Image (cartoon, grey):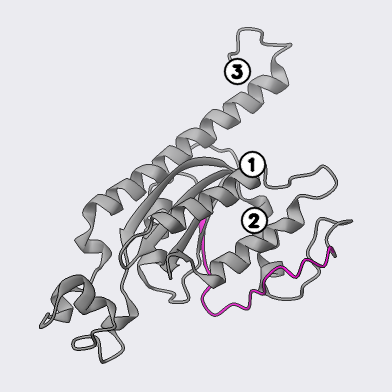
Amino acid sequence: MWNDPVKVLGISGSPRPNANTAGLVKAVLAGCNVSTQFITLAGLRIEPCKSCLGCKDTNECVIDDDHSVLRKELLNANALVIGAPNYHNMINGLMHCFLERFYQFRHRERNLLAGKLGVAVGVGGSKAEPVIQQILAFFQFYRIESVGSVSAQGVARCFDCGYGEWCRSGAIIKAWGADQDLAKIRPSLDKQPDSLKEAFELGKRISARLKEKAHGDQCHQSWRRNPKCQV
């Protein structure tokens, strides 16, 4: 580990604090060899952007909720690991509200998130790609440099509702068929070693890229004194 004051902030947008989304975000953080912090949005009050333009003069949202508490963490972090589950083939509402509020960071020719690194984490009962693509779209809009993405299968709520074994409207019979042992087929990260390995490698990639950027910044500041430094 080097001594640069860098931090990777991992945020899980799942309303379930200990579900696969949170676990996969943590797996990315585990691969980092810099300081990390994990935050779950579960239980927090995050309102959607109201398009009120209250942030246009200060680049700071005027809505008084839990997003304002996270503002400092977002600005101080050098890299963001954003994870969300797939709800109805799109990013879930809680994370979407959280990302909508990034609008406060980009007024008056400023973009306070530009140059940060980002990793998109998607979890879905059937597929996670729609979630990943939507997170990457936010990264592009706010000029966050994408380092990569990782996905895993999540746990459909049908596993816990009490009717999933026989409900033909639910996900279990549609995906696995009838007469299943729910405990046996229930998706968990320990059954998805490839996803865990990929997440860990992404954490290592974040650390390497942060080191490259720190070296480039140092060279840029001292290029007159050190013309041999490569940037």
Q: Is residue 87 above or below residue 179?
A: above
* Image coordinates for residue 139, horizontal then vertical, percent: 58, 47
- Identify the image quadrant of residue 153: bottom left
Would you say 223 lies left or right of 37 here?
right
Is mark 3 in CB contact (under 8 Å) with mark 1? no
- Residue shown at 22%/74% (left/top)? 174
* Image coordinates for residue 145, horizontal then vertical, percent: 56, 39
Is residue 41 one of those drawn in magenta? yes
Mark 2 surroundings: few (<14), some (14-19) or many (≥20) residues within 10 A: many
Which label sits in the foreground, 3 or 1?
1
- Identify the image quadrant of residue 215: top right
Residue at image mark 1: 143
Q: Quadrant of the C terminus?
A: top right
Which label sits in the foreground, 2 or 1?
1
Residue at image mark 3: 231
* Image coordinates for residue 146, horizontal then vertical, percent: 51, 41
- Identify the image quadrant of residue 222: top right
* Image coordinates for residue 188, horizontal then vertical, percent: 25, 67
- Residue shown at 74%/11% (left/top)? 224
